[in-house]
Amino acid sequence: MKTTAFNKIHKSLGGKMVEFAGYEMPIEYKGIKAEHMCVRESVGVFDVSHMGEFWVKGPKAIDLVSRITSNDPRLLSPGQAQYSCFPNGKGGIVDDLLVYCYEPEKYMLVVNAANIDKDWAWVVKQNEEVGAEVENACDDICQLAIQGPKATVVLQKLTDVNLAEVKFYTFTTDKFAGVDDVIISATGYTGAGGFELYFRNDVAEQIWNAIFEAGEEFGIQPIGLAARDTLRLEMGYCLYGNDIDDTTSPLEAGLGWITKFNNGRQFIDRDFLTMQKNEGVTRRLRGFILSERGIPRSGYELANAEGEVIGKVTSGTMSPILSKGIGMGYIAKEYSAFGTQIFVKIRNKIIPAEIVKIPFI
C-alpha cells in the first residue's frame, strides 16, 4: 500500500489504519461519532493527501479543461475554484473533481484517490487532440482539510492572509506556518466550514504540528475517513463509486448546477445531456430519512407501498446530528417528489421513509 507523509503520525496517535484507494489511511481514531461532532462543533483535521492533483498548463489549458469538464471553467478568474465532473462520453461520469484557476494558463484538477489512474488516462487521451501541457503531481503534493466552525480562528494564527476574505470556493497562495507557497483553499466536504491546504511533502510534519499546536485550546482532533463519510452524507454530497459513477449522469444525480451549456460551449456529452435536460430523466438521486429505527446501507432496495422495487440506496448511515437513519438513492421519478413516502428493505424488514430535500441538516 502507498502511504502519505502523515502515516507515522496517524499510527502514533492510535489511528485505526485500513486500505483505501491503494493507500494505508486512518478510518477512525476515537470513534466515528466523537470525531463527527468535533468537526460539527469545533475543528478537526483530515489527511486527504491521497487525493490526486493534475496540472494543466499553457495556451491550450483552458481548451482542454473546458472540453473535459461539465461546468464552465471559462467563468473562473485566478483565485477561484469550481466543482465539476468529467462526462465519460456515454452519459456517465468518469469522476467528480475540483478545478482551480491558478493563472490564466494554469489550472489544477483535484480528483478522487480511487480514480487517479483512470482519470489521468482519460485526461491524457482527451488531450491528444488539444495539446495542452499536463502534469501528474499526485506524488508531490500533500493535502490537509481543516474543517469546523473554529477552523478559521485556528488557522489565522499561522498566516498573515486575512482568512475571512477567502470566500467559499476561492483560494490564495501564501506563507503558512513558515512555509512558502501553500495553497489555502476555502473548499471542503463537510458543510462545517474550513479550509484545505496544499503543500510540499517535506514540510508535512511541520505544518501538521503547527496546526495542532494552534488548535489545542479548541480541542482540535485528527479525523478519520469514516467520519468524513458521515459528515458529507449529512450534507447530501455525492461520493464517487456510491452516488455517482460511470453509469449515472450528472442530471440524474442532481448536478445540473455543474452542467453548463453556456454560449454553445462544446464539451464531452453535451448533446446527450442537452437531450436529458429537455426530455427529463427517468430516475433521480434523492435523500430520505427513515421514519423508524434502522440504518439504510448501499445496495438496499427502495420500494413503494405495494412492495414493488422503485430504486436502490447508494449511501446511508445513522446521522449523529439527527439520531435517525438517513440515505440517498436513485428512485423512479414518479416517486421522487419531496414528502413522498417510500420504504427501505432492510434485511427482513420494510422500514418506512420520507423523501426530503438535502442537505439533511
Image (spheres, rainbow, N blue to C red):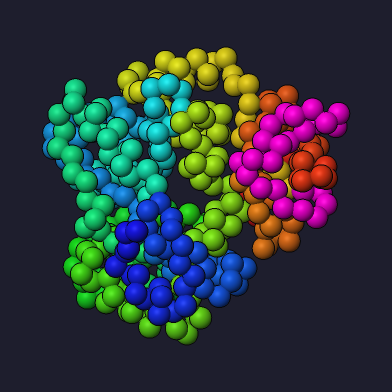
Residue found 50% across the figure and 64% down from its top: 27
Drawn side of residue 96 relative to residue 349, left or right: left
Q: Quadrant of residue 343?
A: top right
Which is nearer the eye, 272 or 72?
272
Residue 293 located within the stretch drawn in magenta: yes
Image quarter where the C terminus lies is bottom right
Which is nearer the eye, 269 or 305?
305
Q: Residue furthest right?
A: 306
Q: Quadrant of residue 259?
A: top left
Q: Which residues are magenta?
A: 290-314
Residue found 18% across the figure and 26% down from its top: 128
Which is nearer the eye, 71 or 328?
328
In the rendering, at what x and y percent does residue 203 appear? 23, 71
Residue found 53% across the figure and 20% down from its top: 277
Drawn side of residue 112 relative to residue 221, left or right: left
Instruction: Say whether residue 167 is visible.
Output: no
When the figure is inspected, residue 124 is found, relative to residue 219, above or below; the finding is: above
Instruction: Say whether residue 8 is visible.
Output: yes
In the rendering, at what x and y percent does residue 20 appear? 43, 55
When the figure is inspected, residue 142 is found, relative to residue 277, above or below; the finding is: below
Q: Quadrant of residue 288?
A: top right
In the rendering, at what x and y percent does residue 207 appear? 29, 74
Drawn side of residue 121 relative to residue 332, left or right: left
In the rendering, at what x and y percent does residue 104 appear? 19, 41
Give the main secondary structure of the magenta stretch. Answer: loop
Q: Residue furthest front?
A: 1
Image quarter where the N terminus lies is bottom left
